[in-house]
Image (cartoon, rainbow, N blue to C red):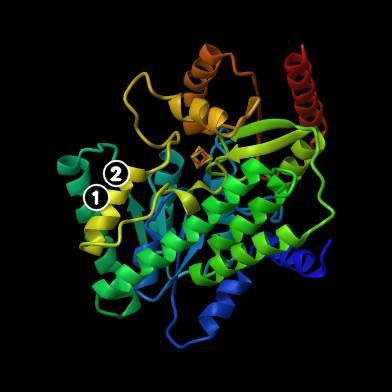
Amino acid sequence: MNAELAQLLDRVRGLSEDVDFACVREWKGQGSGRKAVGYMPIYVPRELIHASGMLPVGVLGAGDRLEIIRGDAYFQSYICHIPRSTIEMALTGRLDVLDGMLFPSICDVIRNLSGMWRLLFPDRYVRYVDVPQNFSPDVGGAYWRRELEQLWSDFSGLAGRPRDARALARSLEIYNENRREIRRLYEARSLEPWLYPASELYLVTRAGSVLPPEEHTTLLRRYRELVAEESERREEDLSRIVLVGTFCEQPPLGLLLTLERAGCSIVDDDLLLGLRWLTEDVPEEGDPLDRLAAAYLECSCQTASVYQPEGRRGGWLVESVKRNQAEGVIFCAPSFCDPALLEQPMLVEALAAEGIPHTQFKYSENTGQFAVIREQAGTFSDSIRLWSEA
Ligand code: SF4
């Protein structure tokens, strides 16, 4: 592998494993008064944090890199792992680098976590971001516009900077560019998945949760250029798979590697969905806050936390399978993840109606044993190949 590509991949892997947020500390140390605001998965309007001169930081759990000692005491046993590791990181001072924290409305676990945060850290800025579930401009749109206005005021107070519409317009452009580059990579991966293994694309995308967006866009571009120069990557005859259910608690990297080794070529996924939530550019003309609010209504991606009228629940998944010429779907959800698991039957029904094969298993961010998953995914991949040849 090209030395620069290997170096870039080492760097993004290091960023994903760093539960101490060294790069955020470094960024803050580069200027006086710099502040950072953390956010849980999935979507928060990062543009507003950026426009206030602060760094948005994704808090995506600690994976298997932290022993949970105090975090378990805060939660019952039958919920997912990400809130435990998040509390553990907070109680061990790892999140002290964050001057504020946002909890987007995905599920009750995140809602409860935001309440705990208020009690544990009464001096820090905390906000539960209740995104609209009504997509009519007069109802959900008006509500979301007011929420964004409030958030922007809060951030400007936290940063000690007046609200600046021109700065926000610039931030919209910067994030448009960033999402565009991620979309380019996803499209390139769908065309030639052997060039962009999911385990790599995941790390390269994930770096955007801690790097400033401008730097992340440059990194994404360089990755694409380096892969284009890479001569050792050869086309492989693997099963083309869409991976679903990974939008919040992130699977361990070992799980993605296991799927690849089991013969699955991931051509679409819902990993790190918050970093690419808006599927189109926020328009360049008009009031920037209006544009950001409208973009949520008009071009949010489809996932479990977004309301959809009855009957259309699985349409987006079938569409993804067709668009990416996938041969099957793997439902891969965190254990006890209500949003992912409750919608699975509806998605399965949509796949069954189209005769699209699927399989499912669960994980935890700290899962360390992959033998059973490898066997299951390998059998699924083999059966797809056999059916397609029959
Ligand atoms: S993994 Fe699922 S249940 Fe857990 S916090 Fe995320 S969305 Fe909620």
Residue, x 48% and y 69% (percent of image)?
98
Q: Secondary structure at mark 2?
A: helix
What is the three-letter code of the residue carrying label 1?
A: Trp
Between 20 and 183, the one nearer to me in the picture: 183
Residue, x 49% and y 18% (percent of image)?
350
Between 191 and 8, the one nearer to me in the picture: 191
Q: Is residue 156 above or below residue 370?
A: below
Q: Which one is earlier in the sequence, the residue at label 2 or at label 1?
A: 1
Position in image of residue 146 (x %, y %)? 19, 55
Is residue 85 found left or right of 200 in the rendered image?
Answer: left
Q: Is residue 24 visible?
A: yes
Residue, x 79% and y 36% (percent of image)?
370
Name the residue tied to disc 2.
Answer: 297
Q: Which mark is residue 144?
A: 1
- The quarter holding residue 259 reads top right
Quarter of the image with the N terminus is bottom right
Is residue 41 found left or right of 241 in the rendered image?
Answer: left
Position in image of residue 203 (x %, y %)? 66, 55
C-beta proximity under 8 Å, tags 2 and 1:
yes
Q: Is residue 124 visible?
A: no
Q: Secondary structure at mark 1?
A: helix
Respond yes or no on whether mark 1 lies under 8 Å from ligand 1: no
Q: Is residue 56 above or below residue 60?
A: below
Q: Which mark is residue 300?
A: none
